[in-house]
Image (spheres, coloured by chain):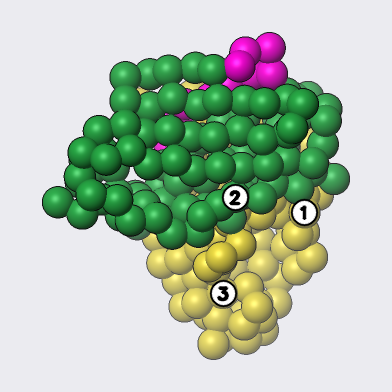
Amino acid sequence: GENVEQHPSTLSVQEGDSAVIKCTYSDSASNYFPWYKQELGKGPQLIIDIRSNVGEKKDQRIAVTLNKTAKHFSLHITETQPEDSAVYFCAASNGGYQKVTFGTGTKLQVIP
Amino acid sequence: NAGVTQTPKFRVLKTGQSMTLLCAQDMNHEYMYWYRQDPGMGLRLIHYSVGEGTTAKGEVPDGYNVSRLKKQNFLLGLESAAPSQTSVYFCASCYFGETQYFGPGTRLLVL
């Protein structure tokens, strides 16, 4: 089955700096890569996703890149703000019934 | 729309007791999922359903049962709770091949 590895497990940045979270996946058939943000005491919420026919996608301060050859994808957050502090999960799916395999999460702390 | 709701929010059980967690969604989604979240292990799929009346095993199904008698509801049952089932449980739903929407979670403590 699919295996998703995520690094780092914790990340502290100064407000205004950029944050990068990296993930690798094992199943070359995976074609959908969502990123979720989980705030304390809440369920994960999708913040951005990318499909395998696209190499990069941006949404304001958030961007995701995908390298299918190397089987890795990354989340980039620019101009970080305190409200970006949360746990971020990457995930991979090969479609069908959309069974998604999650990474182990990155706890991001943005220091004011 | 309420989205995905879960009841209860928190529960304490003794070893061997049983309980049912309820997930409800009002988005007319076909697919529904149950995950458990443990520290350092991300989200692991317990069971899922691709439509009313259907269920299937996920990554960690042992000790759990599920039912999807109505399209909007997905029930997760623990017949004989064990301390290893102490976790936070999340339900999610999605339309065909689209974004999964998560509920707020149920925190379960088994003593």
Depth check: give the residue in front, A62 or A86: A62
Which residue corresponds to mark 2? A6
Q: Is residue B83 visible?
A: yes
Q: Quadrant of the N terminus of chain A?
A: top right
Secondary-structure class at tag 3: loop
Task: Identify the residue shown where x is 61% and y is 33%.
Answer: A73
Residue B103 horizontal side relative to residue B60, left or right: left
Which residue corresponds to mark 1? B59
- What is the drawing colour of chain B? yellow
Q: Which marked residue is nearer to the observer: mark 2 or mark 3?
A: 2
Q: Residue furthest top?
A: A53
Alpha carbon separation for disc pair 1 and 2: 19 Å
Pointer 1 with pointer 2, Cβ within 8 A: no
Which residue corresponds to mark 3? B86
Q: Amino acid at mark 3?
A: Thr
Task: Identify the residue shown where x is 67% and y is 35%.
Answer: A72
Q: Specify start and end residues of the magenta stretch as a single range.
A: A43-55
Secondary-structure class at tag 1: loop
- What is the drawing colour of chain A? green
Task: Identify the residue shown where x is 38% and y is 41%.
Answer: A19
Secondary-structure class at tag 2: strand
Q: Position of residue B34 (x, y in %)?
A: 63, 49
Q: Residues within 10 Å of mark 3 (few under 14, many from 20)?
A: some
Q: Amino acid at mark 1?
A: Glu
Q: Badge 2 sits on which subunit?
A: A
Residue A67 covered by magenta stretch: no
Residue A1 horizontal side relative to residue B103, left or right: right
Q: Height in image: A78 above or below B46?
A: above
Task: Identify the residue shown where x is 79% and y is 41%.
Answer: A26
Q: Residue B22 bears which disc, if any?
A: none
